[in-house]
Each structure stands twice: as C-alpha cells, then as structure tokens.
C-alpha cells in the first residue's frame, strides 16, 4: 500500500480520540490528595469489594469516572474497626450495584467527571475533544467510501455522556433553609406528594410534575430543592441547563432522555434543573433564528415532561432568575405549572439565615447576629453564608478561638466588595426610596379602582432598589377608564412623593421604569381604547406579545398631525394624574412619614398592616377618598 497522508491521518485520528479518552479518565479519577493520602491509593479488587458488601463493612461509596471507579469507606476489622479508604476499579456502570447500595442504606454519591481533575484540564479536554471530533468527522465524511466502520462509527463518539449528578441522600432538611418561609410552606406539599402519593391519587388528584423556583442568584433555590429531596428521603438528580447545551447536535436531547430514564428507574425522586433559562429560552427568539441544538434539547424536555404521568413519582424542580425569557410552552399546565418566588431575605429572614450558618461556627458571645442582619440589606442567603465563612477564615488566620465583631466587620467589607449593586446602607438614599415606595402604596390604597397593596419592601431585587406589590383584585379582562387612571396615578406616586418631600431638585432616576409604564398606559388609552378627547378611534394596532424586539413592530396608521394630537392627549392625562398624586401625598403627609419610618425599620410592610395604619389616620373608608376623574 502506498503511503499517503490521508491514510496516515485516518488511522491516527481514532487513536488520538481513544488516547484522549484514556487521558481524560486519568484526570477523572480523584486525585489522591483529596482523600487521606495513604489509604485512598490502596486498591481493592471488585471481588473483595463484594465480599465487604456481604459482610456489611462498607460505609460509603463515591462513584467517579462514569461509575468505573469507586472510592469506598469500609470498616477494617483488623485495625480495631477503623475506617479505611480504598479504591475499587469497577467493571463498569452498574445499575444493580447502585440499587443494592441504596437498598442497604450505604452513603452513595455519584460524581460527574467534569468536576474532577483540575479546571484547566477539563477546560483543555472540553476544547480538544470537539476540535478532534469535528476534524475527524469532516475527514471521515470526505472519505466515507472506504473507511473501516464508516461514518456511523465516528458518529457514536458524539453519543451522550450522562453528566447529571445523583445524590442518594442530600442530607439537607427544611431547617437548613431559612428566611424564605412562604416558599417553604408551598413546597411542603411537594414533600407530601413524594411521601404519600396515595393520599392524592386515591381521590383522583393529579400530582404536579414541575415546580419552577424563581429568584435572584444565591437565594437558596438549589438548597430548597435539595431540602425537598432530603425531607422526602428520595434521591436527587441534578443538572444545569447550561450543561445540556452542548456543541454536538443531538447530545443535549439525548442527555435529557438519559436523565429522565434514570429518574424513572429511581422514582420517587427529584430532578433538579438549575439555570433552566439556558435551555428554556423562547424558541425562535434571537437574531438569526434560534439555536437549533438548544431548541432540540428544549423540545426533548417538553416531550419527556408530557410523556409521564405526574403519578410516577418524579417531580421536576427547575430554577431560574430570568422567568421572562422562558418559552411559554414550559409554563403550560402539566409542565412547570407551579411557580414559586424565592426572594432575597428581609431583615428577619437574614437573621434566620445567619442563625442557620452560625450553628457550626465558634462565635463569641459579644457578637449580635441581629446587628449583622441590620447591616446587611440586599445580602442573599449565599452572601450571608459567605460572610460568616469569611469571618471564620479571618478568625483562624488571626489565631483567635472565636469569631468576634472585628472579623465580622472586615468580612462585611470583603463580601460587599464582591457583590454587584451596592445595597442600601446609607441613610439618605434609603429614606428616598422609602418615600418613593410608600408613595406608590398610599395612592394604591386611597384611590378608588386601584388594586390593593400586597406588600411594600426595601429589599432590592434585580435592578429595583425597592418594590411595592399590588395584588390584582380578580381576573378581569375588561378594565374601566377610571381603573386605568387609578393605575397611572399609582405608578406616578413614587415620583410624586419624592418631589413633595425632597423638592424638585432631588428627584431621582428611580422612577424611570414607572414613567415608562405610565406613558404606555396613557398612550394606549388614547390610541387603542378611544378613552380621550380624540374620540373612540383605534389609532394603533396591537403590537402583539412583547418580547425581544417585537415591540418595534408597532405600525403607525396615522398622520403627523394626528400624531401630535395624540402626544398632547397623553401629556394631559399624565399631568392630570401627576397633580392628583402630589396632592394625595401632601394631604396625607403625616401617615406617609410614619409609614416610611416603619418601612425603614422593618424593611417590609405587608398589605394588611399597611391598611391598618392608614385607617388609624382617617375615618373615611379606604378607596372612597379619591375617585379619579378627568
Ligand atoms: N435561605 C437560605 N438559608 C440558608 N442558607 C442559604 C440560603 N440561601 C442560600 N444559602 C447558602 O448559600 C448557598 C448557595 O445557595 P444556593 O446555591 O441554594 O442558591 P441558588 O438560589 O440556587 O443560587 P443560584 O441561582 O446562583 O444557583 C447554600 O448552599 C447555602 O449555604
Ligand atoms: Zn416606582
């Protein structure tokens, strides 16, 4: 045979790929330094391991390298029952072994390959492998005629490697999750579903399949999902949305399939998908069409969720901080139809989180957790955990026996330095935001036709530095003119209060979002609902669902002259409402001041308490005081 570069490459390529796998798996086995140096490198044969199992000497098993290597802890009967660590080479991924270990209550952890070895190796691995594979595929396809095994063989290299993690027992309980009581209460039911499904199926109730946890990073969504598994005593499968989205077509989808297959085999169990927005973005959105791979993965996820009954005992919990970008198909009944908000904790919540994390630390008596909670508005659960940990590290470094206030102070600085968006600690801006929020809330309470206040809070969230929540009174599709005016007035309440209290020159950019809403509502009154002096005309067509770029599509169907008349009408509506808003704040200044003080002290006031305080200052029933007219 004549030597040719092509043939040479053809044979070296598979060798390289195989070599790469071997090389990678040598990193995948845990480094000895991770464990006790002397014992972790001691090997044990599979046969011995089975004997140890029979003799109930195995305490825990950690599986690495796709189930090919195990690090076990076993009782050494010769060495006065000391625990020894041993490495076992397993014949391969064995579901029987896993179910036996679980049945015998042996601590089992399955570790994904990716997290083992050092970061740089896995990064290199992730880069080299795709390059080799793509190169190889390209080459093989060009030569497909006379390649041993043909391209089909090459394709199978792309087959999925299941990269989800399984914890037989998470060991996390609801007690370990603090400061998010509402979310915990709602999830208590899911625990019951898993523990006592008969109770629900007996009366024909369909058990929900999916729960979506919505909230900013570090608020404990993962912890909460683990706690559900822990409370129910079921296994916990987890994967991150970004891990689903892979370079090779079909890998993401087959990962989803694998994950669900494993989950069903292990039911009842929890499947946790972190960062679901990475796969679950609106299909077809984005410039230049969707990402095919991601869409296939999402479609597979939807198919899997439809493909099993809620009663199989698999409950899928997903987490996101971007619910707005999710494909609406995910939120339909029978999929993630339960949505639970997990917020940054308020002052009381922060104290509880601190108490949880102080349990395992030595803290001096002089330290007041309450004082720390006061000083840390905007800190998430993870920030607080990090804070106590930093303080403990400083304590050890300073060779003290217990954490003192000095270490806490230094740790607060360190944590704040690493956080996005500096939280509100300074008095003046907190007051200003307090007035802004109370402005919204007082108008919402006193103006007829406005939805009632659900809660007012100074706990920042995303871009907002404070928030007022209104509970929509009931599902209504028709909204009256007076109601829209009430909403516009309410939305202007924040800016109005700032101006009344601090004067013209002190108003802030904080109302930017409010003003956008106000303008849009007023504009729609004029152009869509015929609610202005321009008469009952529809001057603009509905812009359709508003998402990424679509709102640019609003069609103008009127002349420039009408356009300026529309502007004048919009302006007059907004001005009228703004005057009302300022007047209401001025006339109720005493109660507004009192509410702001209370808000600054407590950070959150709920709707009932809010209304009760307002009622102390006026005998006119709420909602009857101001009726929007124009
Ligand atoms: N509510 C809480 N109570 C107690 N500890 C918490 C709480 N929230 C966060 N923590 C601590 O912070 C760590 C990280 O939280 P977790 O990973 O659950 O947050 P997350 O909401 O899933 O964040 P991300 O969105 O970044 O994944 C937890 O392991 C825990 O130590
Ligand atoms: Zn506002």
Image (cartoon, rainbow, N blue to C red):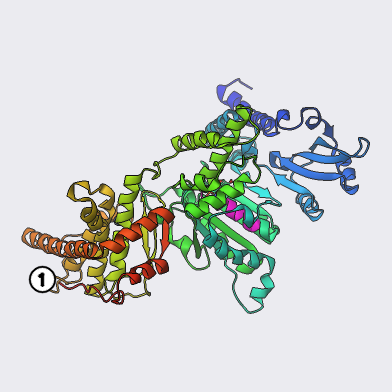
- Image location (x, y in percent) of residue 170: 67, 51
Which residue appears at 33% of the width and 54% of the height?
Answer: 434
Instruction: Work out which residue is located at the far bottom of the displayed protein and give it.
Output: 203
Residue toward you, 334 or 605: 605
Residue toward you, 194 or 114: 194
Question: Can residue 287 be seen by looking at this rendering?
Answer: no
Q: Which quarter of the rendering shows the N terminus?
A: top right
In the drawing, does residue 236 fall left or right of residue 530? Answer: right
Q: Which quarter of the rendering shows the C terminus?
A: bottom left
Question: Can residue 385 be seen by looking at this rendering?
Answer: yes
Q: Secondary structure at mark 1?
A: loop
Quarter of image, res 425: top left
In reply to whether residue 222 is colored magenta, the answer given is: yes
Label 1 sits on residue: 533
Q: Which residues are magenta?
A: 218-229
Instruction: Work out which residue is located at the far front of the displayed protein and give it.
Output: 366
Residue toward you, 616 or 338: 616
- Image location (x, y in percent) of residue 177: 59, 53
Q: In the image, is the residue at mark 1 within 8 Å of ligand 2 by its beta carbon?
A: no
Instruction: Give the class, few, some or many, for how many residues have Cα within 10 Å of label 1's Cα (few <14, many ≥20).
Output: few
Instruction: Work out which residue is located at the far top of the displayed protein and give it.
Output: 3
In reply to whether residue 94 is colored magenta, the answer given is: no
Above or below, comparing residue 274 to residue 3 in the picture: below
Above or below, comparing residue 509 to residue 563 in the picture: above
Quarter of image, res 585: bottom left
In the drawing, does residue 398 fall left or right of residue 553? Answer: right
Residue toward you, 14 or 34: 34
Which residue appears at 56% of the width and 47% of the height?
Answer: 354
- Image location (x, y in percent) of residue 39: 81, 31
Q: Most prominent secondary structure in the magenta stretch?
A: helix
């Amino acid at each position: 045979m004549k030597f040719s570069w092509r043939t040479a490459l053809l044979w070296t390529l598979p060798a390289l790929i195989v070599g790469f796998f071997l090389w990678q798996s040598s990193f995948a086995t845990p480094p000895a330094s991770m464990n006790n140096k002397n014992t972790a490198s001691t090997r044990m044969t599979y046969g011995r391991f089975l004997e140890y199992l029979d003799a109930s000497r195995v305490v825990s098993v950690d599986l690495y390298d796709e189930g090919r290597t195990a690090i076990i802890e076993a009782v050494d009967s010769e060495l006065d029952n000391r625990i020894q660590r041993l490495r076992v080479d397993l014949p391969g991924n064995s579901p029987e072994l896993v179910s036996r270990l679980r049945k015998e209550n042996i601590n089992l952890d399955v570790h994904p390959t990716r997290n083992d070895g050092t970061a740089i190796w896995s990064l290199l691995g992730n880069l080299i492998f795709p390059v080799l594979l793509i190169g190889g595929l390209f080459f093989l396809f060009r030569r497909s005629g006379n390649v041993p095994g043909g391209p089909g063989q090459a394709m199978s290299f792309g087959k999925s490697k299941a990269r989800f993690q399984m914890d037989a027992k998470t060991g996390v309980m609801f007690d370990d999750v603090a400061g998010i009581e509402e979310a915990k209460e709602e999830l208590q039911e899911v625990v019951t579903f898993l523990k006592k499904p008969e109770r629900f199926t007996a009366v024909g109730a369909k058990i929900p399949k999916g729960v979506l946890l919505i909230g900013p990073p570090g608020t404990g969504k993962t912890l909460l999902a683990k706690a559900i598994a822990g409370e129910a005593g079921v296994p916990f499968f987890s994967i991150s949305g970004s891990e689903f989205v892979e370079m090779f077509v079909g890998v993401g989808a087959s990962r989803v399939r694998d994950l669900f297959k494993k989950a069903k085999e292990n039911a009842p169990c929890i499947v946790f998908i972190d960062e679901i927005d990475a796969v679950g973005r609106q299909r077809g959105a984005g410039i230049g069409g969707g990402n095919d791979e991601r869409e296939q993965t999402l479609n597979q996820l939807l198919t899997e969720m439809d493909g099993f009954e809620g009663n199989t005992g698999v409950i899928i919990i997903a987490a996101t901080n971007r619910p707005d970008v999710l494909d609406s198909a995910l939120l339909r009944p029978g999929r993630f139809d339960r949505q639970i908000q997990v917020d940054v904790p308020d002052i009381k919540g922060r104290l509880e989180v601190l108490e949880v994390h102080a349990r395992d630390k030595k803290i001096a008596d002089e330290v007041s957790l309450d004082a720390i909670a006061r000083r840390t508005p905007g800190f998430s659960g993870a920030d607080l955990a990090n804070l106590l940990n930093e303080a403990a590290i400083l304590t050890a470094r300073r060779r003290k026996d217990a954490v003192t206030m000095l270490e806490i102070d230094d740790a607060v600085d360190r944590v704040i330095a690493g956080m996005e968006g500096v939280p509100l600690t300074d008095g003046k801006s907190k007051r200003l935001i307090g007035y802004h929020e109370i402005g919204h809330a007082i108008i919402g309470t006193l103006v007829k036709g406005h939805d009632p206040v659900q809660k007012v809070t100074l706990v920042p969230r995303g871009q907002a530095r404070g928030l007022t929540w209104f509970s929509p009174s009931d599902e209504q599709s028709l909204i009256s003119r007076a109601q829209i005016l009430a909403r516009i007035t309410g939305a202007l309440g924040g800016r109005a209060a700032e101006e009344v209290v601090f004067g013209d020159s002190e108003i802030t950019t904080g109302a930017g979002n409010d003003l956008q809403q106000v303008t849009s509502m007023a504009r729609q009154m004029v152009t869509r609902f015929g609610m202005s002096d321009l008469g009952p005309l529809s001057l603009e067509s509905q812009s359709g669902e508003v998402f990424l770029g679509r709102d640019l599509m609003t069609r103008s169907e009127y002349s420039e002259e009408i356009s300026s008349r529309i502007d004048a009408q919009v302006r007059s509506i907004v001005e009228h409402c703004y005057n009302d808003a300022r007047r209401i704040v001025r006339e109720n200044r005493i109660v507004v001041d009192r509410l702001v003080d209370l808000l600054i002290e407590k950070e959150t006031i709920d709707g009932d308490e809010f209304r009760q305080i307002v009622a102390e200052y006026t005998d006119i029933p709420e909602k009857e005081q101001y009726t929007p007219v124009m």
